[in-house]
């Protein structure tokens, strides 16, 4: 009986430790940020898909002569190859890629301005320190010259 109790206690402790590690893992900022990114990305994907399928593809179809890409298929035996949907998915991907590219460029531009301001601030401080060090050096030289006389 005691052996079973000891084993149960070990299992409970091990599970408690595992649960604690899992809570720490979930509480990390990166995991939460990743989850938010996936959810927002999914919603963004739906928006872009709607823009492509409901707005852009009909316009492209009109421009190229009224072709509806989603209906383009090839039948080979019992199989139907829906290459029109594939073309539409390629256009979806390209639009999403362009949107992400523009977003990243804007983000880099914003963060670059902040970095430039920080670098300029550090350079000003360094210049002030150099001026102070030169003044201290000159004073030490004067004191040394005076003590030698």
Image (cartoon, rainbow, N blue to C red):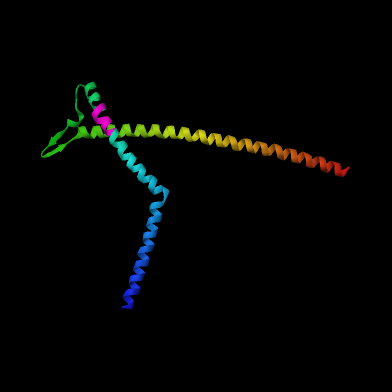
Residue lying furthest right in this view? 149
Residue lying furthest left in this view? 77
Identify which residue is drawn at 42% across, 48% down: 29
Q: Position of residue 65 (x, y in %)?
A: 20, 21
Which quarter of the image is occupied by the C terminus?
A: top right
**Magenta stretch?**
48-55
In magenta stretch: residue 52: yes
In magenta stretch: residue 27: no
The image quarter in which residue 61 lies = top left
Residue lying furthest bottom in this view? 1
Q: How many marks?
A: 0
Q: Tell me: 130 left or right of 88.
A: right
Identify which residue is drawn at 80% across, 41% down: 141
Identify which residue is drawn at 35% across, 46% down: 35
Which quarter of the image is occupied by the N terminus?
A: bottom left
Q: Nearer the viewer, residue 36 or 75?
A: 36
Q: Nearer the viewer, residue 106 or 6?
A: 6
Q: Position of residue 52 (x, y in %)?
A: 27, 30
Q: Tell me: 116 left or right of 25.
A: right
The image quarter in which residue 84 lies = top left
The image quarter in which residue 18 lies = bottom left
Q: Position of residue 68 (x, y in %)?
A: 19, 27
Q: Position of residue 97 (x, y in %)?
A: 34, 34
| Majority secondary structure of magenta residues | helix
């Amino acid at each position: 009986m005691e052996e079973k109790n000891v084993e149960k206690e070990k299992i409970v402790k091990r599970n408690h430790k595992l649960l604690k590690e899992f809570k720490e893992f979930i509480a990390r900022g990166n995991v939460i940020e990743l989850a938010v990114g996936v959810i927002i990305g999914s919603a963004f994907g739906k928006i872009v898909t709607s823009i492509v399928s409901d707005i852009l593809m009909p316009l492209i179809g009109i421009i190229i002569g009224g072709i509806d890409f989603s209906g383009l298929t090839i039948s080979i035996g019992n199989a139907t190859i829906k290459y029109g949907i594939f073309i539409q998915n390629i256009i979806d991907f390209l639009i999403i890629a362009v949107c992400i590219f523009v977003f990243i460029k804007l983000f880099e531009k914003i963060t670059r301005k902040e970095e430039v301001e920080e670098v300029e601030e550090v350079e000003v401080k360094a210049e002030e320190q150099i001026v102070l060090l030169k003044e201290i050096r000159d004073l030490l030289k004067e004191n040394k010259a005076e003590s030698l006389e």
